[in-house]
Image (spheres, rainbow, N blue to C red):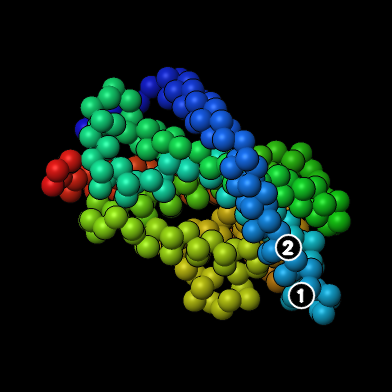
Amino acid sequence: MKTQLNPRRTVFLFFRFLAQNTKIKLEYKADSLIMFVSGAAMQALGFMFLSVLFSRIPNIRGWTQWEITWMLAMVFITEGLVSFAFEGLWQMAFLVNTGDLDRMLLRPVSPILQILTYTMGVHGIGNMALGFALLALSTSRVAVEWTASKILFVPVFILSACAIRTAVSFAANCSTFWLKAYFNAFPLMIYQLADFVKYPSFIFGRAVEAFVFFVIPYAFISYVPAVWLFGKAAGNGAPWIQTLWTAAAWAVPLVALWCVFAARSIFYHALKSYDGSGN
């Protein structure tokens, strides 16, 4: 059943659900603190690996340590925001197998909103904290000619990147409607593919680069914006290449909208296979 979308009410309910979930999680202070620290610590390992790598080599095909750290920071920030606000998407298998989805379908509220905000991830706060710290550190160490368009671009990109990550993970979790398993490894596999864009994707080969551009558009989370911000395409020769990368960077919001639309369509198509509680 599709629910009539009311943007103002949707935003209001989102923040109400998020506030309530945050209160529930923070009720257990020690557990929340452990999750916060572990979230930051797990991601810090990636930065430590990067530091060790660049202690041995000066750059990777013209990419410096702090430019790649900037990419890493953006991955951490968007991953943290999605985990904090939309952790419920990882509960879809639980909701389907226990029949709790029945209640959501009967309420006069979008089932997608209810699923996404079913819970929140405290570890996401740790990811965001580390991400913003690395962002500040790397931004102060990279050579970027900051213009009004580039300053405007960063928050637009972050929101768009969050939408891409949420939509892709949500669509992948919809596979639980067909697989009927309590534990579904497919969404986790799709989620882990984002590791390819923690670094310039060309280092993994053309096949992987094409995959993260055209199949699962994770490249638009960090790689495409970084190429444009740091002017990495300028060294490729022809001026049209720089123009192409600029267009790709500003297309990030359009890619995000496409992903959101595709994920919504997949969900309502998958919902036709839902048997309900007791089957």
Residue 110 vs residue 31, the one in the foreground: 31
**As drawn, is 84 to the left or to the right of 211?**
right
Label 1 neighbourhood size at 10 Å, few (<14), some (14-19), many (20+)?
some
Q: Residue at x 57, y 64 (%)?
A: 195
Q: Which mark is residue 47?
A: 2
Q: Is residue 270 visible?
A: yes
Callout 2 amino acid: Phe
Q: Quadrant of residue 151?
A: top right
Q: Is residue 242 visible?
A: no
Give the quadrant of the N terminus.
top left
- Vertical relation: 165 (above or below) 215: above
Residue 99: give x, y in percent of width and height. Answer: 23, 40
Callout 1 amino acid: Leu
**As drawn, is 275 to the left or to the right of 55?**
left
Residue 154: give x, y in percent of width and height. Answer: 68, 44
Residue 138: give x, y in percent of width and height. Answer: 80, 55
Q: Which mark is residue 13?
A: none
Q: Which mark is residue 53?
A: 1
Label 2 neighbourhood size at 10 Å, few (<14), some (14-19), many (20+)?
some
N-term-proximal mark, 1 vs 2: 2
Q: Quadrant of residue 147?
A: top right
Residue 63 vs residue 57, the one in the foreground: 57
Residue 43: give x, y in percent of width and height. Answer: 66, 58
Gap in Å between the C-alphas at discs 1 and 2? 10 Å
**As drawn, is 76 to the left or to the right of 106?**
right
Q: How many marks?
A: 2
Residue 253 vs residue 7, the one in the foreground: 7
